[in-house]
Image: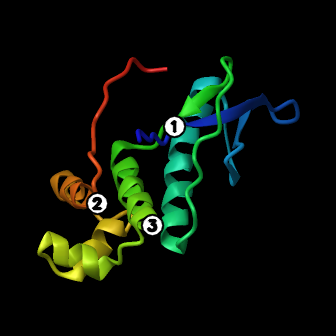
Amino acid sequence: MKRTFDYPLNLTADSDDGGFVVTFPDFPEVVTQGDTESEAITRAADALDEALAGRIKRGEDIPLPSRAKAEKRLASPSAFIAAKTALYVSMRESKLSQVALAQRLGCDEKEIRRMLEPHHPSKLPRLSAALSVLGKQLTVQLEDAR
């Protein structure tokens, strides 16, 4: 199964203060804004990173992205947070413990804990190796900017 972490966002003109407000149907806790549409969308990607990181730290579910309507915009997390989120989701789905994953990778459990720490600078090849142990393949895709 292919899974992305691109989430639809709601962009609303702020009639009171000017600028634009961004919310996410899949993350009710996220609200951000910007003076321009472009700035609001850039901030939305940063807010999505933090929402995913927060859910990982709290051990909460990561929702599947809602189906976006044709006119809806999408926000994507950074590649780094997407890779960490992929590992977190894959471990939860497989019900494999950190200790068991460490044994399969031939490393200390502390390394797995660090890989799951959203802001720890884990190396992409190690995240990819951990995902491989879980039967997943991490891919990078290049697209034109939205």
Q: CA distance from mark 3 to mark 2?
A: 10 Å
Counting labels gives 3
Q: Which dot, 3 or 1, sits closer to the camera?
A: 3
Q: Is residue 14 left or right of residue 1?
A: right
Instruction: Please state the horizontal and vertical placement of residue 128, each as a whole percent of the image.
Output: 22, 52
Do the residues under discs 2 and 1 have CB atoms within 8 angstroms?
no
4, above or below 50, in the image: above
Name the amino acid, label 1.
Asp
Instruction: Please state the horizontal and vertical placement of residue 71, each as a whole percent of the image.
Output: 68, 18
Disc 1 designates what residue?
A: 6
Name the amino acid, label 3.
Arg
Q: CA distance from mark 3 to mark 1?
A: 19 Å
Disc 3 designates what residue?
A: 92
Q: Which dot, 2 or 1, sits closer to the camera?
A: 2
Instruction: Please state the horizontal and vertical placement of residue 78, each as a whole percent of the image.
Output: 40, 43
Mark carried by residue 134: 2
